[in-house]
């Protein structure tokens, strides 16, 4: 699936927009460990999105000891919320977090944020997720626990 998605993305025309770069896990890991992530580029990255609504969220990359701090753009956030609503209707309970395995498309934006126990905001490169390709948000596949 990843190979097909990446081929489609790389074959599509950019029409003068920001460049698009598909990154393997190792290249994505090197990118986020660097001092500065270049702007103006849309990245396509495979990973696992985790959120527990308490400690924040991250995208873990295979075989990487660092993680990406994501921000879900409106369309992607709406997909996640739609899944949560469907789960609540079908199962009668509330999901307390997310685990989404997929291919994430987006760009990096540097913002200041309070992380961990630091007393001052730090500059952080957030990955603004504008699209996700995953089976994990398919509301037809919801199975209730218990």
Image (cartoon, rainbow, N blue to C red):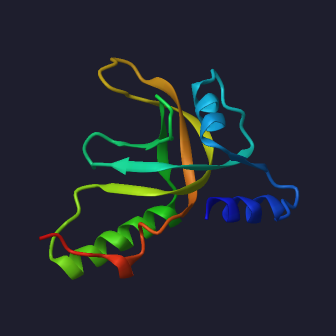
* Residue 81 screen position, x and y as percent: 36, 67
Q: Residue at x 59, y 40 (%)?
A: 25
Residue 101's place in the image compared with 21, above or below, is below
Q: Is residue 37 above or below residue 22?
A: above
Vertically, is 46 above or below 119? below
Q: Is residue 117 left or right of residue 103?
A: left
Horizontal and vertical percent position of residue 143? 26, 75
Name the image quarter holding residue 79.
bottom left
Residue 138 in the figure: left or right of residue 87 = right
Q: Position of residue 8 (x, y in %)?
A: 75, 66
Relative placement, left or right, of 36 versus 49 is: right
Position of residue 140 measured from the top left corner of the image (x, y, whole percent): 37, 82
Please name the residue shown 50% across and 32% down the image: 64
Q: Quadrant of the N terminus?
A: bottom right
Query: What count of labels does the image hold?
Result: 0
- Looking at the rendering, in which quadrant would you find the C terminus? bottom left
- Which residue is the extreme one toward the top? 119
Q: Note whether 102 is above or below 139 in the view shown.
A: above
Which residue is at the front of the view, 109 or 60?
60
């Amino acid at each position: 699936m990843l190979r097909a998605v990446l081929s489609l993305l790389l074959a599509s025309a950019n029409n003068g927009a920001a460049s698009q770069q598909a990154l393997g896990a190792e290249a994505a890991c090197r990118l986020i460990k660097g001092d500065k992530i270049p702007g103006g580029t849309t990245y396509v990255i495979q990973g696992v999105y985790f959120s527990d609504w308490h400690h924040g969220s991250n995208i873990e990359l295979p075989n990487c000891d660092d993680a990406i701090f994501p921000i879900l753009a409106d369309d992607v956030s709406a997909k996640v919320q739609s899944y949560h609503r469907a789960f609540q209707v079908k199962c009668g309970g509330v999901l307390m977090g997310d685990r989404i395995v997929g291919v994430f498309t987006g760009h990096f934006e540097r913002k200041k944020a309070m992380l961990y126990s630091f007393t001052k905001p730090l500059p952080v490169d957030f990955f603004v997720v504008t699209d996700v390709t995953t089976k994990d948000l398919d509301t037809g596949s919801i199975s209730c626990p218990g």
